[in-house]
Amino acid sequence: MIRESDSEHGGAAAVTTHHLTKRYGTDTALDAVDLLVPEGAVYVLIGGNGAGKSTTLKVLMNLERPSSGTAEVFGLDTALRGPEVRAQVGYVPERHNPGYGWMTGGRLLQHIASYYPSWDDAYADHLIRGLDLRASRRVGSLSKGETRRLQLVMALAHRPPLLLLDEPTDGLDPVVRKRTLALLAEHLADTPTTVLITTHHLYEVESLADHVGVLSNGRLIAQMPRDDLQRTVRRYRIEVPDGWEAPSDLRIASERRSRTGREIQCIVVGEERAITERLTLAGARVHEVSSLALEDAALAFLPAEATR
Amino acid sequence: MTQPALHSTPAGRAVLVEQIRAVALALRLPAIAAAVLLGVATLLVIGERVTGGGPVGFATELALIPGLVAALLPVGVWKGEDLFDAAFLWTLPVDRRRHALAKVCAGWVWLMAAVAFFILWFLGLAFFTGGNVLGDQMLRVLPSAIVPGAGPIDPAALQIVQWSPDAFLWVAPFTAATGAYLLASAIALGTRHPLRWIVGIFFGSLLASAIGSAAHIEWLTFGPARLWATLHAGPYGLDALLTARLQSLETLVPLSNGQVVGAWRGLPDVGHWAMATLLWIGVGLMSLWAAASRHRERRRPSRE
């Protein structure tokens, strides 16, 4: 796995997992995952369907028991101190089912408030207004997007030190999504919070992300700060002689050849200087090196079939 | 960055109070329906009284109602909770087993209030119609030597006994409801598909009897029926818990003069009722603990 060293993040960790493994029968949902979310970070965990993103969050909430390995939230072992861990967490689950369908949104928020001594009524009202939520409606009659917004209010209004957001923008239309992300940014500015977001669409939360992890088939194949990721994964435009083959030791995520086959645009994982030297040694002429959007850089770690 | 101040978990009392409020909301519709039913029953009784009907008095059928309501109550209490998945309840910062028991406790509080209301309604109805549920009653009692169902009985053989309902009969609806509620809650909380279990056990016992009958195995043929009879009408059976055996002790007997009358095979016994109540509530509490333990916090396997 490609990752920063523990000392690099330079502070305490909000979330750590050690060889976290979760199996369902013969299926392995999580395979020895060593997650490290620094305190104060907005960590985006990406991966395809079934990569293990939601399972990771469920284990952190102690909703699922790991088959082996451990997980800690602010130093609290999730398997031993579940209630205390959940007291620190604002959780938006993958499923659009925020609770009791017969309650109104407002009554559900009142219900939640009694579980969190730190619940901030004024802030909850602010979020309700900001997300244009009709709290007088029954939860069961809310649309998918409205349900998601209600879940976000439930997660944010007690100002938890950790937010676990599982596909938080799922079901939101573009306008509401933008407003939601703005509110989230405002929340992060006002409240010291660590955020762990899972998503299929990194571009949606790109403005917030400062750390990225990539899960593939239950394995955490990369995790690093955003800047490191964008520095490590670059697009190279190279000119090559006829019949040129890329060196096998280079980690090429994608490759596109021109019609003549002599100009290639490829995304390569590794330090720019070392890659440039290696390409030059192999007979290629590097014309241009450019950075990638965060999502494209992160997708470079996923197998090609997962990114199609 | 400084270590963030960790948030505390809610106080147990706050959780219980909120659960009582939330369960009240969940039960609002069934409660309204029950109130409407009682209203209709009140109008019917008053109408009958006005048109010359008798006053409302002691009725054994009414003793069953709290127990039956209690057995159905968990359906309302656990409405909307996907207990065997990532239920909303489990995402809250409370120990899962304790949380489940707090919800059961909240339902019980409302159950006791409903039983008290029902008894007061019944007493009020009796009072306004001129009945006296606390007064002495004249009961026909079958001598122990006579077996009901053996044929017509000489009317002179029936003993007429003066009986006043014991004070414990007014406690019995509360204990009956408690026992039934505990057992039903254990089923609702501990099984993924409660209805399938109930139907499965019913048809399983029928199948066992059928197989026993086909194979001429007497214990298998009659065993399930005997077991059910013991569980229901035995001295410490469910009827002893639910009605202090008022239901199973009263029976219809044909008389030699062609009449069919209600008669009692015995009178309710405080000792049987107390034992049955202790037994069933004990079983209910243990089952409930076991059921709630299925949802306890996910601990790491011991090998870790």
Image: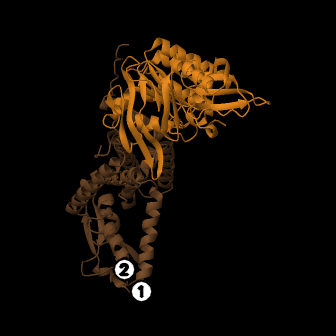
Residue density around tag 2, few if under 14, some if 14–19, many if 20 or more, within 10 Å: some
Q: Chain of mark 1?
A: B
Report which quarter residue A297 is drawn in.
top right
What amino acid is found at the position of numbered circle 2 in the picture?
Answer: Leu
Q: Which residue is mark 2?
A: B220
Q: How far apart are the two marked residues, 1 and 2, measured between alpha carbons? A: 9 Å
Q: Are marks 1 and 2 in contact (CB under 8 Å)?
A: yes
Q: Earlier in the sequence, mark 1 or mark 2?
A: 1
**Chain A's colour?**
orange
Please state, as top left, top right, bottom left or bottom right, where the C terminus of chain A lies in the image: top right
Q: Is residue A203 visible?
A: no
Q: Is residue A270 visible?
A: yes
Q: Is residue A36 left or right of residue A246?
A: left
Q: Nearer the viewer, residue A223 or B74?
A: A223
Residue density around tag 1, few if under 14, some if 14–19, many if 20 or more, within 10 Å: few
Q: Residue at x 54, y 16 (%)?
A: A185
What amino acid is found at the position of numbered circle 1 in the picture?
Answer: Ala
Q: Chain of mark 2?
A: B
Q: Position of residue B250 (x, y in %)?
A: 34, 69
Q: Is residue B61 left or right of residue A165?
A: left
Q: Position of residue B42 (x, y in %)?
A: 47, 49
Q: Residue at x 58, y 16 (%)?
A: A182
Q: Which residue is mark 1?
A: B215
Q: Nearer the viewer, residue A297 or A63?
A: A297
Report which quarter residue B146 is drawn in.
bottom left
As helix, strand or loop, the secondary structure at mark 2 comes to helix
Q: Position of residue A148 (x, y in %)?
A: 57, 30
Chain that appears brown:
B
